[in-house]
Amino acid sequence: MSSILIENGAVLTLNDAGELYEPGYVSIEGDRIVAIGAGAAPERLRRAAAERIDATLMAVMPGMVNAHTHLFQTFLRGLADDKPLLEWLAAAIWPTAQALTEEEAYVAAKLGLVENIRGGATAVIDHHYIHTDPRNDDGVCRAAEEIGVRFLLARGWTDMGYHPAFMETPDQIMAEMERLYATWHGRQDGRIRVEFAPLIPWGCSDETMRRTYAQAKAWGVGCMIHIAETRKEVEMNLEQRGMRHVEWLAHLGVLGPDVQLVHSVWLDDHELDLLEQYGGVVVHCPVANMYLASGMARVPEMRRRGIVVALATDGPGSNNSQDMLEVLKTAALSGKVSTLDAMALLPEDVLWMACRGGAHAFGQPHWIGSLEVGKKADVVLVDLDTPFAMPVHRVASALVYNLNSGSVDTVIVDGKVLMRNKQVLVVDEKALLAEARAVCKRLFKRAGILS
């Protein structure tokens, strides 16, 4: 097994006690953390390490979880700026997505996963709902297998009321999920997994919601769904079913700790009561919610109630990037301004959401989300030695309020170094960028988006 010793850094464990070792060390063997502590590393660990990483003037933190994105949208940034959600879908997403092939999904996902690495995310949940080519999901999973991130394919589906090109029958949904589960779930020693992902309440029938959730429970996997992103969508559900979104999930019996509720902007008090009662992970996407003028989730109140909140970029078509450090700052600031309380969300709170909350969303709180002995070796080193942050008086503050993806120095997943000294090691990045430009140009020409 390979062994790595990270030493001399400011180690934010994000364990239950919130311990910070400044300086400290982290020792890795294979895919696990085997030792962590304050001060200088014991000489026996220094001698045993095949590789030593000097983290002087760096923060050493758990890899963040980007708990919701749409990787195919790396090709769609900037195409439909300054539009509300439903107009944005019609202008940008639907025309291009209808033409997307497996190879294009593969290249777009590779590009998006490299972007996630550079943004400090070691785990990514991709809500992929474009199946006009039935092998698109395989293209995305193949990209994750090659790039090396921890990856959860949330296989999206819709069976009513949505764009006809993207709807499937219940039997098609189940058959394809069974194929993907057999093909990809547990690949790479469990680094790649799959789960169900009903798209939106207005596109999903009650019967298929119950059917897919029952199968998810049988497999021991989760479900992800966009919930109450806009006020209009809540009104649509009230007109159609007489219930708000979380009420509807509870009515169906599709609510629990294994369900990720993305956005959750327009929830009322009763819906928060239901989340308290049944569980569920709220996935907060503050940049995208601002970008689309959707509103702002009641995150400080959710946290006071004990509701688990994770953080995410959302797709790069509505962000327009996947920079998790940017999400940290935006989450903190939006929590303050939406409550007029400067202490509503502190740096430690948003780091917890990005790591520990993200681990819950990912379905692996026992494996990832903190730096502790026995947990997976998913570690990020962030350069603090920059005019944007120095002098650093409080590491958590610097991470949240001062830095962006340009400061991410080293990324390790499962004990494998994916990026070192700000250089991506798992792919020829320049060649990938050139390939993405060429592939996107062909896609747009075929889709009739741009000449």
Image (spheres, rainbow, N blue to C red):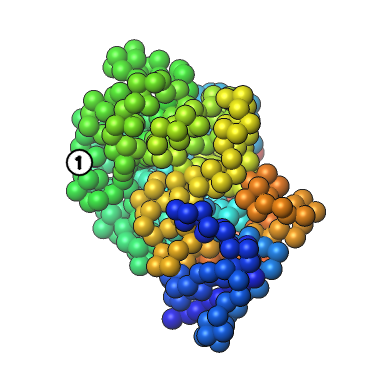
Residue on which the image places disc 1: 214
The residue carrying pointer 1 sits among few (fewer than 14), some (14 to 19) or many (20 or more) residues within 10 Å by Cα, namely some
Of the 4 image quadrants, the one containing the N terminus is bottom left
> Can residue 310 be spotted in the picture?
yes
| x, y percent for residue 81 | 63, 30
Count numbered badges in the picture.
1
The foreground one among 9 and 286 is: 9
The foreground one among 257 and 11 is: 11
Question: Please, is residue 21 above or below residue 42 in the view?
Answer: above
Question: Please, is residue 127 above or below residue 10 in the view?
Answer: above
Residue at 37% over, 54% down: 364
Q: Which residue type carries mark 1? A: Ala
- Left or right: 76 in relation to 374: right
- What residue occupies the far right of the structure in this picture? 387
Question: Please, is residue 162 above or below residue 76 in the view?
Answer: above
Residue at 57% over, 68% down: 38
| x, y percent for residue 287 | 59, 35
| x, y percent for residue 24 | 59, 68
The foreground one among 296 and 422 is: 296
- Examine the image and state in which quarter residue 427 appears: bottom right
The foreground one among 297 and 444 is: 297
Residue at 45% over, 22% down: 266
Question: Please, is residue 189 above or below residue 360 in the view?
Answer: below
> Can residue 450 be spotted in the picture?
no
Of the 4 image quadrants, the one containing the C terminus is top right
Residue at 47% over, 54% down: 17
